Amino acid sequence: MPSTPRPGLDPALLDEFRRIVGDAYVIAGRQELLVYECGAYTLERNLPHVVVLPASTEEVAAVARVCAREGLPIIPRGAGTSLSGTVLAVEGGVMIALTRMTRLVSIDVRNRRALVEAGCVNAWVTQAVKGHGLLYAPDPSSQTACTIGGNVGTNSGGPHTLKYGVTTHHVLGYELVLPSGEVTWLGTTWEGGEDVDGLDLRGAAIGTEGMFGIVTRVLVRLIRAPQAYKTLLGVFETVEDASQAVSDIIRAGIVPAALEMMDQLITQAVEQAYKFGFPMDAGAVLIVELDGLAPGLERQAQSVTEICRRRRAREVRLAQTEQQRAELWKSRKRAFGAIGRLSPNFITQDGVVPRSKLTEMMRFIEECSRRHGLRIPNVFHAGDGNLHPLVLYDERDPEQVRKALLISDEILTQCIALGGSVTGEHGIGTEKMDFMAKQFSKDDLEAMKQLRAVFDPQTRCNPHKMFPGSKKCGDFHPKKQAAA
Ligand SMILES: Cc1cc2nc3c(=O)[nH]c(=O)nc-3n(C[C@H](O)[C@H](O)[C@H](O)COP(=O)(O)OP(=O)(O)OC[C@H]3O[C@@H](n4cnc5c(N)ncnc54)[C@H](O)[C@@H]3O)c2cc1C
């Protein structure tokens, strides 16, 4: 028996949505809506008025047309793993969740492409094509849960971004339901060749956090799976030595497929949780993955080992079997999951600095941690200079919330000061919109808004995200309490 509906939406509209998608796929009860009050960024929360789960492009378009007629906000949602408040229903509204649209529609092995529905989970694509010696390269650590539509929304990366790039480099085209309910396609089509007639708008809606419409199907590029891998674990006494090794590896002209770092605090938590065999007393560990043709890899692995040793690595281990390699990646990719052992809450920051500034930035983070008295483990894509400091706090204590927010601000401000960026891959959402004005000029922001207006003239699609000056906060959120 569903709980009482959240007030504010005409019950006749709920019936209209039910007629489009079926009774079972309209969620309007207060209790049931709690699942959708936030994504993986939990500091701000608010209930949407209703969640609608369509099963086809036609159903998405029909729901969007009702919203257009009624002037209702739309919030597109995939798996809700966003870490920056991109799926927050700031003023309520109609959340369109794509989690019933999970089909891999077609695989074209010869041309190395696949057509997938937006709710398809990222990891399923590679699982489906690996028998053909292919893979889908973008591999966020959340890849066993996050959706291809969400990846397009945030232009996701992952550990292998260093060599293979982010989502936009692997999306050939996609179907987009505009906030008006009109259906369009941007980029290469399944039927068409590589060329795009007219303006090439393929990239226009990628990374726009659901503000340009609802992506329903995506044509993704597949790549040939590497012939061989060498995956090394470097164990260092200090983060500084590990950071120097990162710079040295790149300077030596080696382009690893992945170059990831975990500091002591996170390595200990990961080891306690998953028992991979990480040394509990290491200051930092580096995971270096080399891939490509087997003959050249041996030499590269030797070079990486020498560089690590020159930077005082205590030990450099090579994964001896595919199972060891898989276990190592499993532990790394589930690192955020181990944080529950350290703290009830955490904010995952996502800043970027030039690789040459990694050491300086890590020192800054350590100093922030000391000054404010909150612990900050780090697990990150070191090769890209893409940091993920995890600011630990307890949301029941407003003072800790205040400090966690302050630390986040200080870290992002420092990223800009060092010539970096306030997001590498998690997006801006509600969390970081004030930083947009620090990173971009007024004219830049205005140009972005004008492009958005072409797709969504009424700014109804995922409103109050990304642009400074947008409305903030929901009904309840610790952020508001801390500010009080
Ligand atoms: C443990 C953990 C690890 C993570 N690791 C990484 C990582 O390594 N790299 C990385 O980039 N991110 C990472 N993330 C962040 C997150 O997983 C990504 O941003 C992911 O792409 C979000 O996908 P989702 O399906 O959960 O989308 P959601 O969180 O549901 O939505 C994200 C954004 O996309 C929009 N959106 C979703 N679906 C659609 C659609 N069909 N059409 C239009 N807009 C849509 C939403 O409106 C929102 O703005 C991690 C998150 C967690 C919790």
Image (cartoon, rainbow, N blue to C red):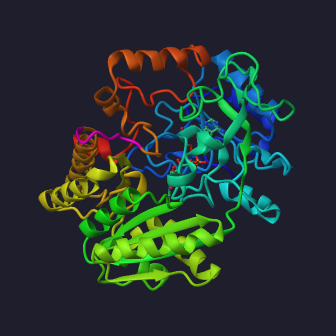
* Relative height, residue 193 to residue 269 (above, below): above
The foreground one among 86 and 157 is 157
Total marks placed: 0
* Relative height, residue 313 to residue 35 (above, below): below
The foreground one among 116 and 459 is 116
Q: Position of residue 255 (x, y in %)?
A: 49, 58
Q: Quadrant of the C terminus?
A: top left
Q: Residue at x 78, y 46 (%)?
A: 113
* Relative height, residue 93 to residue 442 (above, below): below
The foreground one among 251 and 280 is 251
* Residue 331 seen in this snapshot: no
Quadrant housing residue 287:
bottom left
Q: Residue at x 40, y 70 (%)?
A: 286
Q: Position of residue 462 (x, y in %)?
A: 54, 30
Furthest toward the left, the residue is: 371
Horizontally, residue 118 falls left or right of residue 427, namely: right
Q: Position of residue 222 (x, y in %)?
A: 73, 50
Horizontally, residue 140 falls left or right of residue 225, namely: left
| Residue 69 magenta | no
The foreground one among 366 and 226 is 226
Q: Position of residue 54 (x, y in %)?
A: 76, 39
* Residue 448 seen in this snapshot: yes
Horizontally, residue 8 falls left or right of residue 170, namely: left
Point out the stretch of residues depicted in magenta.
417-423
> What secondary structure predominates along the stretch shown in magenta?
loop
